[in-house]
Image (tube, grey):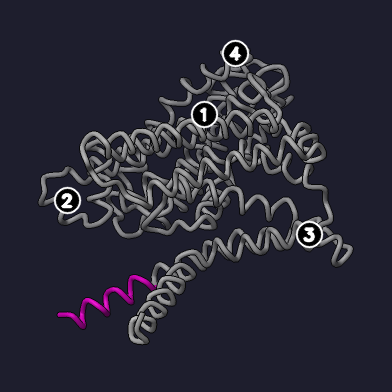
């Protein structure tokens, strides 16, 4: 290789590395903070894993509900708080009528759908009147909807809306109590369906990964032999690496008794994880059909989409309705895990924390994927777990960690919005120079 070629290769590597850092800076920072906080907290890995699995199962469905509006060019939907209210309305009705177990959970999901569809439709209609300002609009709509929600459940229920339930009602006979216990009705109605220890779950998942990767390798090799078609070396290397790494990890777990016992103490709520995987699959499938292509086209350029014959307003409403339905279901999953419904406060921070989590995963106002949502939930909640404990070890005051968590939640959203605005301005200036 000549010195000129060597210099060119080095420059390409430098550019690629710089681009990688700029695109994943938030993820890298949170990974460093999370790992550093874990070591500073001096907590056993089994405790952190158990908490992380619990929080992942509890929160991921809500975060995934943000993806479709982002793809459709409507930004980060702080209005999922409205969907959360729809889920809570269904839970209140379900507990009053005595729904229990997994069957009761499914009925609660169905019961939330009419509320979510109505709220999503009305939200979508308003957002079509405020194009370009969707995020602040959904945030204000959440505050407005919260006022109506509280008016209904503090004043109308028991006075205008007939309801007689001494367990749930305030002693005056009007209004729902501040706290509704879900024990015996919907608590763990999904989480408790099927649980497996983490060591068994890891074995099953890695066995499935190995089987799928080997199938892909064999299929590609047969295709080369039959048709003489060249196959991407990158794809083959990726599948081979997956097989090797999976086998190596399985061997490590089998040979390390201490690590295996630690995994055995962590339970995985399989049914909840299956629901999360199903929503990921739904998001992928939607993007492959015409509706998903319409979402993408509108997200890239609404004017071009209109010229192409896409009903932009109608498609945007569909995007918000889907997001509202998924967020209602996500809130039901969240609350059955918690086991207690705080009637007037459970929904308040849903939008903020879900948006913060997906942004931590590398998403932006204009781009979001399943992978970013999953990575974001893991990193964001890892920091939530370890920061109070690290604060206690460092300063003998766990409250410092609590302040840090709130600061991070709002700070990461602010930085994301600022970076998006900066990128838009930079792109606009670049286009002006080209013109």
Q: What residue is pinned by disc 3?
A: 39
Please report whichever mark, 3 or 1, sits nearer to the chain's N-terminal start: 3
Please report whichever mark, 4 or 3, sits nearer to the chain's N-terminal start: 3
Residue at screen point 31% across, 40% down: 287
Please report whichever mark, 1 or 2, sits nearer to the chain's N-terminal start: 1
Q: How far apart in space, not on screen, are marks 4 and 2 (Cα)?
A: 46 Å
Which sits in the foreground, 35 or 201? 201
Q: What residue is pinned by disc 2?
A: 305
Quadrant housing residue 418? bottom left
Please report whichever mark, 3 or 2, sits nearer to the chain's N-terminal start: 3
Residue 164 in the image: x percent, y percent? 64, 15
Name the mark nearer the viewer: 4 or 3: 3
Where disc 2 sits, the SS reads helix
Residue at screen point 37% across, 44% down: 68
The magenta region covers: 422-435
Residue at screen point 33% across, 38% down: 220
Which sits in the foreground, 18 or 371? 18
Where disc 4 sits, the SS reads helix
Judge whether 308 appears above or below 207 on screen.
Answer: below
Q: What residue is pinned by disc 1?
A: 275
Q: Quadrant of the N terminus?
A: bottom left
């Amino acid at each position: 290789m000549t010195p000129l070629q060597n210099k060119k290769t080095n420059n390409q590597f430098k550019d690629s590395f710089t681009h990688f850092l700029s695109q994943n800076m938030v993820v890298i920072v949170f990974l460093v903070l999370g790992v550093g906080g874990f070591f500073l907290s001096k907590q056993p890995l089994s405790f952190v894993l158990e908490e992380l699995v619990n929080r992942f199962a509890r929160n991921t469905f809500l975060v995934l509900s943000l993806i479709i509006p982002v793809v459709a060019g409507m930004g980060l939907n702080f209005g999922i708080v409205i969907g959360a209210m729809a889920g809570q309305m269904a839970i209140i009705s379900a507990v009053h009528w005595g729904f229990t177990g997994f069957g009761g959970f499914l009925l609660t999901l169905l019961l939330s759908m009419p509320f979510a569809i109505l709220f999503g439709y009305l939200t979508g209609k308003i957002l079509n009147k405020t194009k370009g300002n969707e995020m602040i609009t959904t945030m204000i709509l959440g505050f407005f909807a919260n006022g109506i929600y509280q008016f209904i459940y503090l004043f109308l229920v028991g006075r205008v809306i007939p309801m007689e339930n001494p367990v749930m009602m305030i002693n005056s006979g009007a209004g729902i109590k501040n706290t509704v216990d879900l024990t015996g009705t919907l608590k763990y109605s999904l989480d408790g369906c099927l649980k497996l220890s983490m060591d068994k779950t890891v074995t099953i998942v890695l066995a499935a990964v190995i089987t799928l990767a080997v199938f892909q390798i064999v299929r590609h090799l047969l295709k080369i032999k039959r048709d003489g078609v060249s196959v991407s070396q990158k794809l083959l290397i990726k599948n081979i690496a997956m097989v090797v790494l999976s086998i190596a990890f399985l061997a490590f777990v089998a040979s390390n008794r201490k690590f295996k016992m630690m995994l055995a103490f962590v339970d995985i709520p399989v049914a909840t994880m299956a629901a999360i995987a199903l929503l990921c699959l739904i998001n992928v499938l939607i993007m492959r059909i015409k509706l998903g292509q319409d979402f993408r086209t509108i997200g890239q350029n609404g004017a071009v989409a209109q010229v192409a014959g896409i009903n932009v307003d109608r498609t945007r409403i569909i995007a918000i309705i889907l997001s509202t339905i998924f967020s209602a279901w996500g809130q039901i999953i969240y609350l059955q895990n918690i086991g207690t419904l705080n009637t007037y406060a459970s929904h308040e921070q849903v939008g903020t924390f879900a948006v913060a989590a997906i942004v931590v995963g590398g998403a932006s106002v204009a781009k979001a994927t399943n992978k970013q949502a999953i990575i974001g939930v893991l990193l964001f909640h890892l920091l939530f777990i370890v920061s109070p404990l690290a604060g206690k070890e460092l300063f003998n005051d766990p409250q410092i960690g609590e302040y840090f968590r709130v600061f991070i939640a709002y700070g990461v959203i602010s930085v994301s919005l600022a970076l998006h605005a900066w990128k838009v301005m930079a792109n606009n200036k670049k286009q002006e120079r080209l013109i």
